[in-house]
Image (cartoon, rainbow, N blue to C red):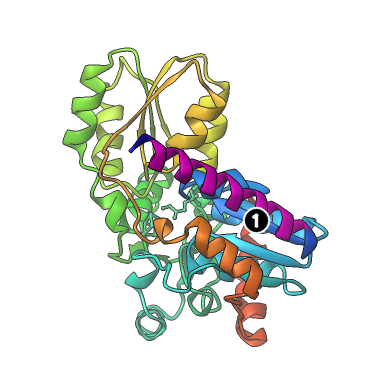
Amino acid sequence: MLVEQSSRVEQTARLKDEIQRIKKEKDVVILAHNYQIPDVQDIADFTGDSLGLSRKAAKVNQKTILFCGVHFMAETAAIICPDKRVLIPDLQAGCSLSDSITVDELRNWKKQHPNAITVGYVNTTAEIKSELDYCCTSANAVNVVKAIPADKEILFLPDMFLGSYVAKMTGRKKMYIWAGECHVHAGIKPEDITKKLDSLKDAEFVIHPECSCTTPMLFDMASGSFDNHKVSILSTEGMMTHVNSSKAKNFVVATETGILYKMRQQNPDKTFIPASEKAECQYMKMITLDKVYDALVQDKYEVVVPKEIADKARLAIERMLAIS
Ligand code: 13P
Ligand code: SF4
């Protein structure tokens, strides 16, 4: 058993070395989302959130980006970096949230509200982005909505928890929210959080705005229920920055559990507890070291966004970047 384990460790180390060698030889930059498995995060040049990674990719010299994340993220990189080739190790790595609205559904919705401004989360396909007025991320959704004149109707999609959070924070009245959700974050329930926080009295609480517990949590915060805990609603990279600089020693983390690897690695003296151990995104976990290796060796799978879609989608992203 021990012998088996040590040969597996050696194999993994060899595979990582090979990936590093081929990556340099082929002049490829590897990006990994914060939810990727630890081995994949280890071989990445950069880890971060979806938009942050794509913006980083636009600044590096390499002409090929190997995106270890889900499909909409690789598309976003292809939109932001039109002169580069974007590869993803597994084309099946999708996203339940981005699947929760189709282009036809969006077009119908827009027809019902012809004067509305459409704001869409970055977790959407390139085709959906090409239909948006503004793109937004979990980090800047509040500012994007605040920048739109108050008398305008807004269609917000696809995440209903992020949408409710934004509506609450901005006090926006004419904001219609698509009833989409991410199955991973929707599965983190307020009861999970309460139990964990009760077990760690001095813990800070960091939460992703896609969680189903966000909305009740906002009301609880306003009524003082969390007075013993500092609560921060942040994107994945926002969470990283926050826990790295916070003086607190204990944290309850409400998002996909992959982020705990980097938090623990960068803060060995702090304790991180997941709000729910079950919060795992099976799409993110489809990317393995073997698939990264195959992708590098065989130059697969290329993610191509047709120019007319990419140009329109880029506009929505640029409008967002001009605000935040
Ligand atoms: P971030 O952009 O905050 O990393 O979130 C992406 C995502 O897929 C959340 O589930
Ligand atoms: Fe999509 Fe949810 Fe997975 Fe993020 S965690 S990639 S929103 S399914």
The residue under the point 36% across, 47% down is: 165
The residue under the point 47% across, 36% down is: 261
The answer to whether residue 235 shows anywhere in this view is: no
Which of the two residues, 46 or 54, is positioned nearer the viewer here?
46
User: Residue 22 in magenta?
Assistant: yes
Q: What's the amino acid at mark 1?
A: Ile
Residue 49: x %, y % from top left: 55, 49
In the image, which residues are magenta? Answer: 3-24
Q: Residues within 10 Å of mark 1 (few under 14, many from 20)?
A: many
Which of the two residues, 246 or 283, is positioned nearer the viewer here?
283
User: Quarter containing ligand 2?
Assistant: bottom left
Residue 245 sits in quarter: top right
Which quadrant of the figure contains the N terminus? top left
Which of the two residues, 156 or 90, is positioned nearer the viewer here?
90
On the image, numbered disc 1 is attached to which residue?
19
Residue 100: x %, y % from top left: 32, 70
The residue under the point 34% across, 12% down is: 202
Q: Is 61 left, or right, of 86 in this rendering?
A: right
The answer to whether residue 169 is above or below residue 123 is above
